[in-house]
Image (cartoon, rainbow, N blue to C red):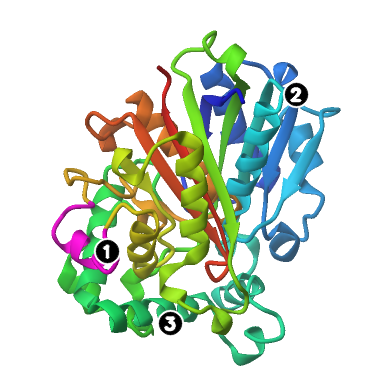
Amino acid sequence: MARASVVGAGMTKFGVHDTPLQELFGDAAFEAFDDAGVGPDEVEALFFGNAMGGQTENVTHLGPQCATHVGMAGKPVQRYEDACATSANAFKNAVEAVESGRHDVVLVGGVERCTPETGKDTDEMTRIFASASHRQYEQPTGLTFPGVFALLTKRHMHEHGTTEEHLAEVAVKNHGHGSLNPKAHFGKETTVEEALDGPVVADPFRLMDCCPFSDGAAAVVLVSDDLADSFDAPVDVTGVGHATDIVPLADKETPHVTKAARDAASQAYDQAGVSAADVDFAEVHDCFTGAEVLASEALGLIEDGQGGVAAAEGRTSRDGDIPINASGGLKAKGHPIGATGAAQIVELTEQVRGEAGEHQLDGVSRGVAHNLGGDAATTVVSIMEARA
């Protein structure tokens, strides 16, 4: 089967925006068009992600609205919702559509606003986020996502001896990386001492263990294998895996191993014909510091039980043997739910091209992105590499 390639990438700054969703998405989409050197009339379809616009801003049926705004009215558009894995799922379906020959040129992306600019305060946004948990078995208990990932992380700590200091090292690393990324929500570095001194959110997580609510958008232009060489610096999508896990959380047999991530990673590596040892860098879904520890192990980048130790030893830093979240990750770059997965694809594209600016890694040609949704119930893993 022919591969799909990313030939254009665009992303807004993540943070606080008072721009309507359609316009915010347009900012990323037009940047992707310009980067690819195509106009909206040349693009055949839009694969679009938005998770919560209906709840946060009373905006549903958003796909056609965004297509209209970017000059793609009349083209097919499909909106995807998969909690925090929303635009990664849109990307996966777009890749399959291009690989199958259904389309030759498509736009993929997502947008979300999650800050008080939506008119919702933190308590209400927390409730909306929690709607991605099990309605009958989890929501009535008051369990929200800091608690979900705290439970997963506590189990990892019990099994492997991971410490709060290890988690703080993840926060310090990602804030250091984010300080080099002008599009990151947080550009400020922190220290282990500051992280450990923060207020407890959900044991073992303190404030600096948690990613922010963010606004933002990201988009990429995908083309078929036959067209890729006619563009500057195409980046091949060599594997995309997609898996789900048991819901609710209490029914998972070994919750701290995040089985969906392992299954999705296995699919992606098999498609790409590579192993974890062949990957140069990774962008993973660090909604909480413990989530990065679990992801690094699920992807096979770090030995099971050693995710926290690896961060403390500097193995996952910019100059380590397997850099993770050079962008700052969700922890510092930010987490606008429906845009997060697409933003990871933008980051992989720019790193492989050598166009990531001040946070560019040295000598990387193959990266992996890991984007999860809900209580680790959905995971999409994508592998991208420089075109040979």
* Residue depicted at x 58% and y 36%: 219
Can the viewer see residue 46?
Answer: yes
To which quarter of the image does residue 248 belong? bottom right
Q: The disc labelled 3 sits on which kind of residue?
A: Leu
Mark 2 residue element: loop
At label 2, the amino acid type is Glu
Mark 2 → mark 1, Cα distance in angstroms: 42 Å
What is the x, y in percent for residue 221? 59, 27
Q: Is residue 99 left or right of residue 291?
A: right
The location of residue 338, given as percent across then percent down, is 61, 52
Residue 306 is covered by the magenta coloring: yes
Q: Position of residue 213 (x, y in %)?
A: 50, 63
- Please, is residue 94 above or below residue 193 in the view? above
User: Can the viewer see residue 11 in this picture?
Assistant: no
The kind of secondary structure element at disc 3 is helix
Q: Residue furthest right?
A: 74
Q: Amino acid at mark 1?
A: Gly
According to the image, label 3 marks what residue?
Answer: 151
Q: Residues within 10 Å of mark 3 (few under 14, many from 20)?
A: some
Q: The magenta stretch spans which residues?
A: 303-316
Relative to residue 146, is residue 307 drawn left or right?
left
Q: Residues within 10 Å of mark 1 (few under 14, many from 20)?
A: many
Q: Which mark is residue 44?
A: 2
Residue 55's mark? none
Please give the residue where the numbered disc 1 appears in the rendered image: 307
Q: Which residue is nearer to you in this view: 176 or 123?
A: 176
